[in-house]
Image (tube, helix red, strand yellow):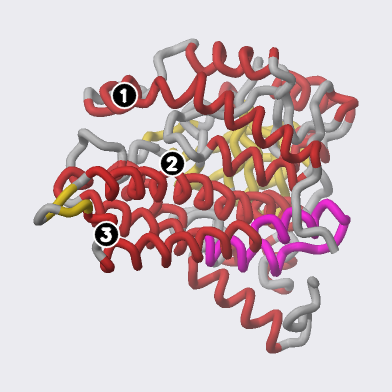
Amino acid sequence: MELRLTDEQKMVQQTIRRFVEKELMPLENDVLRNEREGKPGLPPGKLKELQLKAKEAGFWGINTPEEYGGADLGQMMMALVYMEVSKTFVPFAFGGSADNILYYANEEQKQKYLLPTINGDKKSCFAMTEPGAGSDTQNIKMTAVKDGNEWVLNGEKTFITGGNEADFVMVIAITDKERHRATRGREGVTCFIADRDMGWKSEYIHTMGEWGPAGLVFDNVRVPEENILGELHKGYNLGLEWIGFARWIVGARAVGAAERVMQMSIDYAKERETFGKPIAERQAIQWMIADSAVEIEAARWLVLNAAYTLDKGEDNRHLASIAKLYGANMGNRVIDRALQIHGGMGYTRELPLERWYREARLWRIYDGTDEIQKLIISRNLIKGHVKLGQYI
C-alpha cells in the first residue's frame, strides 16, 4: 500500500502549482475589481489566452483521452490538478476537455459536438435539475414527444452551470411517462443534444456568489432523432454518471481553497498583534489553525481515495459521496475560521475571504445536497451495498 505521490504525480502537482502562482494569482486583484464593478472577472479573450499558455506547458485536455489529443492524466492526477487550481478564485479551467457523458456520442455526433467542444469551438452544458426536481430527480417534468423524425421538448431546467454561455445542451426529458413512473424515474427518460438555435432560451439567475447559473426554457423545441445521446429511455444513467464525476471534484476544490485561506490566516496571525503579541501566540487562534489543518488533511485523503478507486476501474460512488459531503463542509468551516482570524478585514472586500465565503456555501448544495449525500451513504451501509473499511 503506497501513501505517497509518485515522482510523476509530484511533477504534475508542482508544475500546476507554478502555473497558478505565476499566471493566475497575479490576476486576483483585477478579478476582484472587475467583479465589484459588475464585470466578468476575466475580460473577453483572457481565459483563452491562459488556456493556451497552459497548453504550451503540456496541460490541454487533462482528462481527455489521448485519441482526441488530450493528456488523459487519470483521476488521481485530476484530483491533484483541481486542488492546485482551486487555490485561487480566478475563474480558470483548462482547455481541451468535454463533459464525460459526451463521449457516449456516436461517430456523427462526435464530429459535430465532441470534437468542436474539445477544440474550444463550442461550449456545452448539462441540464437535469428542474424547479421542482433538484435532488429528487424522479420528479422531472420536462417531456419529449415523438413527431415524425423529431422530438418536441417542453419544460424548464434551472441552476444549469454554463447554461448562459452554452452553444448546445445535453438535456434530460421524459420520453415514456408510464415507464418513468413504473421505474421511479430510472428509465423512460432520454438525453438529447439540443443546439441553442433549435429554440431553447436561457435566463441568468442571480446568486449570492459571483457565479450565475441559468434557467433554460424549452417551448416546443424540435430536436432531430439523430440527436439522442446514448440509448432511448436510458438517459437517467448518463445523468448519474455526470453527477458522480462532479461530486468528488467538489471535495478537491474545497481542499485547494481551504489550503490557500488557511495559509493566508497563518501569515496574518504571525503579523497581526494584540496587546503586544502576535495573535499566532493566542491559544484560540492556534486551535482554529490546528482544527483546520486536521480537517484539510482528512478531506484530502477522502478525495484521493475516491479518485484512486475510479482509476482502478472500481465503483467509487459511495466514496464520492463521502468526499463531497465531508469536503464541502470542511471547506465551509475552514473559510469561516479564516474570516474570523482576519477579523474585520476578513469581512471587507479588500480581501477575497468574503468572496470565498459566499462561494463555499454553494458547495453543500450543488451536485447533490448534504442531505442527499447522507441519504446515499447511510442507505448503502444499511442495505449492505458497502461495508465499513472495504476500500482499504
Mark drawn on residue 247: none
Q: Nearer the viewer, residue 143 or 161?
A: 161
* Mark 2 vs 1, N-terminal side: 1
Residue at disc 1, secondary structure: helix
Rendered residue at 58%/34% (across/down)? 221
Label 1, residues with CA under 10 Å away: few <14, some 14-19, many ≥20: some
Q: Quadrant of the C terminus?
A: bottom right
Q: Does the magenta-highlighted stretch encompass residue 315?
A: yes
Mark drawn on residue 29: 1
Is 62 situated above or below 213?
above
Q: Residue 154, can we see it?
A: yes
Magenta residues span 303-327
Q: Which residue is mark 3?
A: 281
Q: Main secondary structure of the magenta part?
A: helix
Foreground tag (2 vs 3):
3
Rendered residue at 62%/82% (across/down)? 378
